[in-house]
Image (cartoon, rainbow, N blue to C red):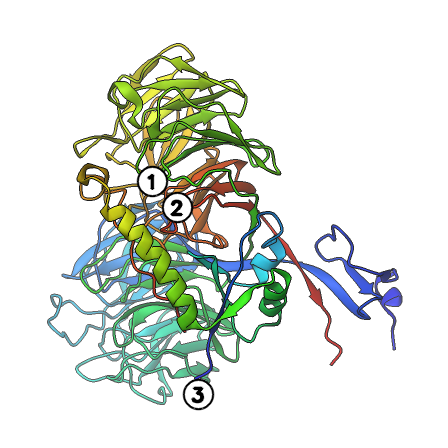
Amino acid sequence: MSTYKEIRGLKVRDYTTNPDNPIEGQLWYNTTDNVAKYQIPNLLSSWSSVGALNTARGVPGGLGATYNAALYIGGSQTVASVEQYDGTSWTEVNDLNTGRKASCGTGTTTAGLASGGDTGPTGSGGNGVANVESWNGSSWTETTDVNNARQGMGGSGTSTSTLVFGGYDGSRRAYTEYWNGSSWTELNDLSTGKSNPGGVGTAYNTALCFGGSTPSNTAQTESFDGTSWTELNDLNTARANQAAAGDATSALSIGGYSTTVVAITEQWDGTSWTEVNDLNTGRYFIVGAGTSSRALGMGGETSTAAVTNTEEWNASVPIGAWATAADMNNTNFNVAGTGTTEAALVCGGTPSSSKNVKAETFNGTSWTEQGNMNTGKYGPGSSGTTTAGLAFGGEPASPSRADSETFNGSSWTEAPDLNAGRESLSGAGTQTSAIAVGGQTPPGTIVASAELFNGSSWTETGDMSAARYAGAMSGATNTASLFFGGTPGGVTLTESWNGSAWTEVNDLNVGRTSLGGSGTYTSAIATGGSPVPANGKATEIWNGTIWRKDSDLNTARELAGASGSDSTTGLFFAGRTPTTVASTEEFSAGAATTKTISTD
Amino acid sequence: MAKTYQYCVAENWGKGFIDHDESWRITFKGYPANVWQVPAYNKHANLWIAKVAGAVKTRDEAQALVDAEVQAAQAAWDALPDAEKAPARPENPRPEDITLED
């Protein structure tokens, strides 16, 4: 038998206890417990909201071999329009020659095929068409029809080697047809006639068909080897009208309709299906692209309407974890927080009904009470550090919620007022280069306006696209910051500020209000929020392009403060659970876990 | 049916109460009244309860503790002037009841 040293050229080091800071992949032997241990990263697979389609339409066709190159084809009401995704946004490209819904897309954005479909209006229960069109990267060309006109087929393969299977022509069909680039040939049928199954496969002879309507929704999975179909293990949840991504050995079944519209995602490992994290928005008639490790779920319909939502699947991404840290000295909610995880400032808020003038600083270990603010501020904004901080707005923050104060590490000094008094606003930047955004100026007036502070005065600048309050911000300066979430509605909307204008960027995955924000314009954390407890545990990481779900807080909270210099570390403090708390949690990205090698 | 979760009462002492490794291994849900929900039949959860000297509670016992805290928060909210709470202040809604899972 080979030894570890013979294989790796190293001996396994003995430790009486585990090493203090093991690195990823490190292997050691714990001589106290007499077991071998190793260090692995903590991983999470999840969906992130990305650029939305330009036009909502249900019952589309779709294709794409990768997550960043896909087509959304036709759709309800016999739409002929087609949109192309480039990894960031959707662009309208040339129309189909024959507008239709429920076509079967195969291939890529440079060489694709749209087969069959239905030219009847939505809800007409049309029997399908035989039309096939090929896509060359810029336009569609009619080509040879399928032998059996139908809609709602599953498909696999490329534009020159495609398999289509199942479908509906007034009855659910088991037909299987093969396209060799010039003609269609009928091959052996599926075991059961079904419409709207999921279909994947990189070639016609390595296809997987799962789910579908028979007309009851089925969990059946079948694989095709070029000659015949073989039944494999079922999906965990029977459904139809799902999206599919991947290949016959590693696939995703995404959303669909079971007994209702579902957000369920299941992953196929070549043998069986396992439930993984849900879509953010449950949908059916959704279409998919990409692989099982990085996929796209596009459009489709919720139970009420066609939607433009697009989500990107990222498998096995290293994620962090929250740990408890020292409590603050005072319970408090609707506070402002600023600084880092090693040097944080919290001020304002309220312990119950009186407006809080208190401030505390965190030094990485404990919280210390500092000098009181001159004016109590409920729901203020803040910026800066523990030795050069700024608090502004909030209620009452006399006069008229416009008051500003600077903090020097121990005491507060009045500073110039905001031009527009407001509360539940958000802030970012430094003491001398700050931005104040959104908020409400009671009674019930929500604003989109923003103001910039230069150390001596506030100046009104460009408005956000949507008026919001109780959102959150990140940003190291007042020329590069991010505003996300907020009310009304607990929205997912995220806007970035470049010093002169606001731009809508990719949404949060969890719509919420009264959340915390920390970090920068390109590396931020969105934490907690309302409603509690449903959304109050959510943590999302902004990488400069998209928000990605990360580990939940240990205790769901709203109206808390947050600090941190980027998305790798964060502090979340105070808030309501719904009782008012003083507790603190500390986030560390890319956490790792020590595993024990079983010898059983 | 086997229970999915177990509950305990333990006062959060701050740093080290839940460390990053425990947070990753165990899905915690913290509730009012220092009630903590962790997975049942889980070695790591049991070790954590022992570490924090948690007082194990049945789901109904834990629910009663949470209810008392939430009801106190609701009473405090009810006593606020109308101008201090929703709908005048939508960000300050009445605390909602919390139902613990089995």
Distance CA(mark 3)–CA(mark 1): 62 Å
Three-letter amino acid code of the residue under disc 3: Glu
Q: Nearer the viewer, residue A56 or A186?
A: A56
Residue A509 image position (x, y, % from top left): 37, 51
- A584 with respect to A595 (left or right): left
For the N terminus of chain B, give its image quadrant: bottom left
The residue to which callout 1 is attached is: A352
Q: Is residue B17 left or right of residue A331?
A: right
The x and y percentages for residue B28 are: 50, 61
Marks 2 and 3 on same chain? yes
Dot 1: few (<14), some (14–19), or many (≥20) neighbours within 10 Å? some
Using the image, determine if residue A295 lies above or below residue A342.
below
Q: Residues within 10 Å of mark 3 (few under 14, many from 20)?
A: some
Above-or-below relation of A486 to A226: above
Mark 2 vs 3, N-terminal side: 3
* Point 36% across, 11% down: residue: A457
Dot 3 or dot 1, earlier in sequence: 3
N-terminal label among 2 and 1: 1
Q: Pointer 1 indicates a residue of which chain?
A: A
Which chain letter goes with mark 3?
A
Mark number displayed over residue A231: 3
Rendered image: mark on residue A276: none
Q: Classify A508 as above or below A35.
A: above
Instruction: State which quarter of the image contains the C terminus of chain B.
Output: bottom left
Task: Label 3, secondary structure: give it.
Answer: strand
Residue A558 is at least partly visible in this image: yes
The residue type indicated by label 1 comes to: Ser
Q: According to the image, label 2 marks what residue?
A: A580
Residue A296 position, x and y percent, is 40, 58
